[in-house]
Image (cartoon, rainbow, N blue to C red):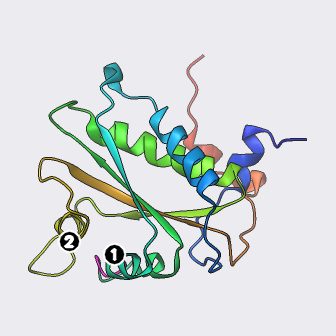
């Protein structure tokens, strides 16, 4: 019996350690199809996705920030989420929705994932993380790079969310 969506959400956690096993092309294809079905403002579909599986490229990507990107080096797969701000004034939101759809589909396929923020982050004092990724992957200058999603088979287990410890005080009701 397939898990419910609630169970998928409860169990999906950021995974930063991956087994060296490659992700099967069929699973990569399903993840990308899910991304292409992501909601987008006025169906502008301003997002574009860059699939990276080459170890040397993943290693170079892992150096795009001083902290928080090293996990890319040992991921067998990364999907870089970009968007065209000229197609939609809400490109950031559209790309964010696509990124979480990628993560949810990966989880549904039994894979782990972790969002690596690229937008508005610096590699060093000379270059942004975004420009570093654009230069590496030959991403056109007019596109914005939101994030890279590291994906692979989990080499760590994380506990599901404890439903009793959710921040229920963040919910406000006006009945």
Q: Is residue 3 left or right of residue 134?
A: right
x and y percentages locating residue 92 in the rendered image: 29, 42
Residue at 31% across, 82% down: 63
Q: Which is nearer the eye, 49 or 144?
A: 49
Q: Which is nearer the eye, 112 or 157?
A: 112
Number of residues whose C-alpha sits closer than 10 Å to that of mark 1, classed few (under 14), some (14–19) or many (20 or more):
many
The mark found on residue 37 in the picture is: none
Residue at 38% across, 28% down: 40
| Quarter occupied by residue 133 | bottom left
Furthest-left residue in view? 126
The mark found on residue 61 in the picture is: 1
Question: How far apart in space, not on screen, are marks 2 and 1 (Cα)?
Answer: 8 Å
Considering the whole magenta stretch, tell me its main secondary structure: loop
140 up-or-down from 133: above or below: above
Q: Which residue is mark 2?
A: 132
- Residue range (magenta): 61-65
Q: Is residue 116 magenta?
A: no
User: In terms of secondary structure, where does tag 1 sit?
Assistant: helix
41 up-or-down from 30: above or below: above
């Amino acid at each position: 019996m397939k898990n419910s969506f609630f169970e998928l959400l409860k169990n999906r956690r950021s995974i930063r350690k991956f087994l060296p096993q490659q992700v099967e092309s069929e699973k990569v294809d399903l993840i990308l199809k899910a991304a292409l079905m992501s909601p987008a403002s006025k169906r502008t579909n301003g997002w574009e996705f860059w699939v990276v599986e080459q170890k040397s490229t993943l290693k170079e990507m892992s150096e795009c920030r001083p902290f928080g990107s090293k996990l890319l080096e040992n991921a067998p797969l990364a999907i870089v989420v970009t968007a065209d701000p000229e197609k939609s004034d809400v490109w950031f939101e559209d790309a964010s929705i696509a990124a979480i759809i990628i993560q949810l589909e990966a989880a549904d396929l039994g894979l782990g994932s972790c969002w690596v923020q690229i937008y508005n982050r610096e590699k060093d004092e000379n270059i942004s993380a975004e420009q570093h990724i654009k230069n590496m992957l030959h991403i056109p200058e007019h596109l914005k790079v939101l994030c890279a999603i590291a994906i692979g088979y989990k080499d760590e287990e994380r506990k599901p969310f404890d439903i009793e410890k959710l921040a229920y005080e963040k919910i406000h009701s006006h009945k």
